[in-house]
Amino acid sequence: MLERRKTIPIGEAVQKIMEYQLHGVTEHVSINESFSRFLSEDLIATSDVPHFDRAPYDGFAVRSIDTTEASQSNPVEFEVVDHIGAGMVSKKVVGQNQAVRIMTGAMMPEGTDAVVMFEVAQDYEKDGKPFMSIKRSFKKGDNVSFIGEDAKEGEILVKKGTVINPGIQAMLATFGYNDVPVAKKPLVGLFATGTELLEVYEELVPGKIRNSNSHMIAAQIERAGGNVHYFGKLPDEFDTCFEAVKNALKEVDMLITTGGVSVGDFDYLPAIYKKLGAEVFFNKVAMRPGSVTTVAQYNRKILFGLSGNPSACYVGFELFARPIIRRMLFSKKPHLRREKAILEVDFLKANPFTRFVRSSVFIKDGRLKVAPSGLDKSNIIMSLSGANSLTILPGGTRGFTAGSEVEVLLLEDQTGSEWPW
Amino acid sequence: MLERRKTIPIGEAVQKIMEYQLHGVTEHVSINESFSRFLSEDLIATSDVPHFDRAPYDGFAVRSIDTTEASQSNPVEFEVVDHIGAGMVSKKVVGQNQAVRIMTGAMMPEGTDAVVMFEVAQDYEKDGKPFMSIKRSFKKGDNVSFIGEDAKEGEILVKKGTVINPGIQAMLATFGYNDVPVAKKPLVGLFATGTELLEVYEELVPGKIRNSNSHMIAAQIERAGGNVHYFGKLPDEFDTCFEAVKNALKEVDMLITTGGVSVGDFDYLPAIYKKLGAEVFFNKVAMRPGSVTTVAQYNRKILFGLSGNPSACYVGFELFARPIIRRMLFSKKPHLRREKAILEVDFLKANPFTRFVRSSVFIKDGRLKVAPSGLDKSNIIMSLSGANSLTILPGGTRGFTAGSEVEVLLLEDQTGSEWPW
C-alpha cells in the first residue's frame, strides 16, 4: 500500500516549478485603485520635475545682479512690481531693482534668478507703492528649484514588478498616469478535499471539523497578490472529482487542492493527476511539514496538491505557490525574503529533515530575534495566527540552542528575495 | 504679516489629538472578505479543538491494554474490524485484540485509546479477514489528539484590534465565524488646496503641477486601514471654501486638507477653522518637515490641516492622522512602530528641530540598518517612493555620523506601537 515516491530537496522542488515559465499580464486601472498593486511597466518620468524654475520658499524673486552691492551698511531697495502665488504666472518682465513677491511653488518671473526669503527682507510702502530692501547679496540660483532638478524626462524612476506604495502613487500622479499599468492578479482556483470537512456555517458533529484550510489558503493567495476562485469541496467519488478538477482548470491560472495527496486510503489526487495526464514535477520533498506536497502541470496550468494538514498546507503554499503568483505580478524577487535571526528558545530535538517552524520574528535593540509562534505540532492551527515568519532548521543530527543564529523566511513582507535556497 | 504661532513638541501634539476620544464601530463581513481587516471583538473558541479524540496519524486504533505483552519475541495479533477515514465514525465498539484501521483526522472508535502507526504494524489476511500484529507495547493516549488539546471552549484566542492574517482566518473558519466582526473602516475626507494644482489627466502648463498629494495621502489612508472620500480641490474663493469644508465634515469621520495651512498670502485654512469655530489643538510643531501642520476638531470630527509640501504632508499624516485611524480600528498599538537601527550614512548638518528623514530600513546580518531613501529636500517626492521608514534625528547642535544608532519609525508594518514618543 505504501506507494514509492522519490524525495527531492526543497531547492530542487522550487526550481522545477520556477523553470515552468508563466508570465504576467498587464491591465490598466485608475490611479484611484492602483495602491498596493504591482507595476507591470517601468514608471518613466513623462516630464522634467520641476518642469519650470520655481520658488521653493515664500519671498521676493529678484535679479541677483541687483543684489551685488547690498550689505549691512548698504541696504539695496527694490520696487515690488507684482505678487504671485503658486500656480500663477507673472506677466511682468522684472527689470533693474525690481522684485516680485512670490509664494512657494510659483514659477520664477522672467528676468529673475534668485529668491530673497521674507525673513531677510524688510518690506514697506512709499507713496502707496510696495518696496522692500535687503542687506546682503544673493548669487544666481539662490533659493531656486531649477527645471529637471528632481527628475529628468525619460528617466526610469521605478522598475516594473514593484508594489505601488504611497510615494509611488504620488509619482504616478505627478507624471499624469491616470490609468496605471499593473499586473493582472492571477486567478487561483481552490478545492478542498476531505469527507471530514464541514462548511464554516455548519454545526459541528462527531468526527467532522470545519474546513479551515480553504479560508487560510484564500487569505494566503490574497496576501501574495492573487485572486481566489473557491470551487468548494471535491466530491468523494473519483469520476466526479476528476471532472471537477478538469473543468476548474479551464477557468483559472493555477489550481490548488488541499488534502488528498498523501498515501492514505482516501487520497485521490495522485490518481486524478495520472488520469489527467498531468506532468508531475515532484510528489515528495525533503522537508517537514509538507513532505507529501505534489506539484504538477497540465495544459500550462500548475496544479498544487498541498497537504490537508494545516501547517503543511500553509508552508507548501508559501514555498511553492507564492513565487509563481509573484512572478505573474512581474516581481523580480518572487520568493519569501530570507534573513538571519537569533533563536530565542531551544530546539533540542534533532530531525533528519529541514524543518519550517511557524514563528514570530521581532526586533530587539536593532537585532532580529525569532521564537516559535506556538506549539509546533503539525495539526495545530493556533500557532499560525501569530506567525509572521518560518524559521528554517536544517536537517541533521543535532538540535538548536537558544542564542544560535538561524535563517528565517519573512511572511508579511513585500520585498521578497530572488532565490533563498 | 507673519502670524504668531505657539510651537509645541511632537509628543504633546500627538497627545492632544489622542486625548480626543474617537471610537471604532463594528460591522460584520463574510469570512470571505475578512482578510486584512481588524477584528473588532476578541476571537473566542466556540468549541474545544479537537472537539473529539482524534487520530493524528494513519494507523490502527487499538486498546492499549491489549498491547502490554507485545515485544520483538512476542508479537500480538489484532483482528481489524473496521476501516475509517477522516470524517467517518466507526459504529464498532472495539473489543479485546480488535483494531480499527484509521486515517489521520478520524475520530477514535469507542473503546480505543492509542494509535499504532502503519510503520510499526504488519498487516495481513487470514481466512479472508484482515489482521495486523505488533511487536511493541503502547500506552494509553499514544498517538491520540485529545479533546481540547489545541484550544478550550471559551478561551480568548486573538484579541480585538488584531489584523486578520491567514492563520487567524483559519481560526475564524474553525470556530464557525461565517460573519466576522471587524472594525468599520473610518471614512476619511480629503481636500487639496492650491491654484497651482492640475488633475492627473490634465496637460502640464507653465506654473502648474499635477496634484500628487491627494493621491499620496489616499494611499496612506488605505495603508492605515481607512476609506477615502476625495472631495477634489478647494475653490480659491473663501466663502465657497468655507461652505465646502463645512458640508464635507457632515459626510466623513475626519477630514484632511493638504496645503493652505502655512502663513503664505493664499493660505485660507486658519481663517476657515476660525469661522467654523473649530477648536484648534495646535498649529505649529517642533519638527521638520511639517512644522505648520494644524489639527483641530469641530463637532467631534478631527480636521487635519497638512502642509502642501509633499514630504511634510506625508510625515504629518503618519504621525498625526494614522493613529486616529488605527484607534478607530480598535488597535491597541495605533502609532508607528519604533525600532533602533544603525545609520549607514553621515547626517552631519545639525538642526535645532527634530527631523524625520524618509528612509529605507533593511536588515544586514540580522541587524537593522537605515539609509535615506533619496535626496532629502522637502519638495522632492522621489525620495518617498523608496521610503519604508522615517528616521528620527533629534534636534540639537550636532549632526549624526554613519554607524550611530538612531531610532526609526516603520511605515510598512501592521504591529505598531503603543506610544513611540
Image: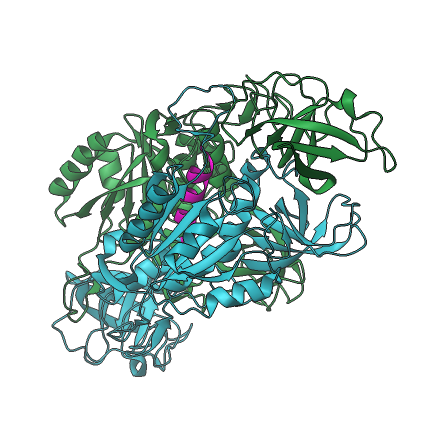
Chain colours: A green, B cyan
In this rendered view, identify the residue nearer to me: A37 or B250: B250
- Does B212 appear in magenta? yes
Above or below A27: residue B322: below
Q: Residue at x 33, y 62 (%)?
A: B118
Above or below B231: residue B334: below
Above or below B108: residue B8: above
In this rendered view, identify the residue nearer to me: A370 or B343: B343
* SS majority, magenta: helix
In this rendered view, identify the residue nearer to me: B420 or A93: A93
**Residue B124 visible, this orientation:** yes
**Residue A290 visible, this orientation:** no
Q: Quadrant of the C terminus of chain B?
A: bottom right
Region in magenta: B211-224
Q: Residue at x 29, y 68 (%)?
A: B55
Q: x and y percent of residue A142 in the render?
A: 73, 29
Q: x and y percent of residue A332 in the render?
A: 51, 31
Q: Image quarter for residue A66?
A: top right
Instruction: Check the image and name the residue furthest to the front.
Output: A127
Q: x and y percent of residue A207 in the render?
A: 19, 68
In this rendered view, identify the residue nearer to me: B408 or A118: A118
Above or below B110: residue B100: above
Is residue B318 shown left or right of residue B404? left
Q: How many marks?
A: 0
Q: Image quarter for residue A155?
A: top right
